[in-house]
Image: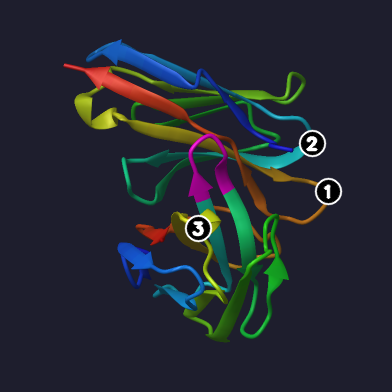
Amino acid sequence: SQQGEEDPQALSIQEGENATMNCSYKTSINNLQWYRQNSGRGLVHLILIRSNEREKHSGRLRVTLDTSKKSSSLLITASRAADTASYFCATLRIQGAQKLVFGQGTRLTINP
Amino acid sequence: DVKVTQSSRYLVKRTGEKVFLECVQDMDHENMFWYRQDPGLGLRLIYFSYDVKMKEKGDIPEGYSVSREKKERFSLILESASTNQTSMYLCASTEAGGVLADTQYFGPGTRLTVL
């Protein structure tokens, strides 16, 4: 079963607004990562947050992790047209084969 | 910067053909991965390798095989391509370090169409 599930599946906002995407997972994790994918391209790593961290920032990105709720959120502030992409969360589970499991992604559209 | 390259951006093959997808990384990473990406299904792991000549099945290995003869190169082989293998194929690599998967570096992808 999918470990990470993003919500919403699609999000459309105006340029300059903030965008929030959520990720839920089922089993205990070592870390959680967010990736971006521009249309028809490979994925680009954005940020990694470890299970003992609660919040992390990188430029206009803010990621939170709530291990008690098994959820994470990615906030993009002051969105730009170039932020239009699909965003994926990926979790590294503590038990079992140590590999990343990706969710199905949130398609973010920034309207000018 | 880490660079992961894939041999083709677009590929069209016929049913029954043997297909080779090549991936090369230039950062001396130990771990390499092959995924396929399909609408509504996200990324699914096909195979991964944590060392030369070592390979492990991922979640959907059926119909595929892999080869890792050199550290920098990881090949995905479709022994007899079928139409249900039409997909976007993504290669990725990571450093070693005890944990198989920290930050993954992805190639640009190969969009394979099997007719």
* Count of numbered marks: 3
Which of label 2 and label 3 is nearer to you?
3
Mark 2 = which residue? A28
Whether residue B4 is visible to the viewer of this picture, yes or no, is no
Viewer-side residue, A26 vs A16: A26
* In this view, A107 is above or below B33: above
Question: Tag 3's secondary structure?
Answer: helix
Question: Bounds of the magenta span?
Answer: B37-43
Q: Circles 1 and 2: CB distance less than 8 Å?
A: yes
Q: Position of residue A72 (x, y in %)?
A: 60, 25
Q: Are marks 1 and 3 on the same chain?
A: no
Residue B85 coordinates in the image, percent (x, y) = 52, 58
Q: Secondary structure at mark 2?
A: loop
- Residues flagged by tags 2 and 3 on a common chain: no
- The question of residue B38 being in magenta is answered with yes
Which amino acid type is marked by label 3? Thr
Q: Chain of mark 1?
A: A
Q: Residue at x 32, y 46 (%)?
A: A40
Residue in view at x 55 percent, y 63 percent:
B34
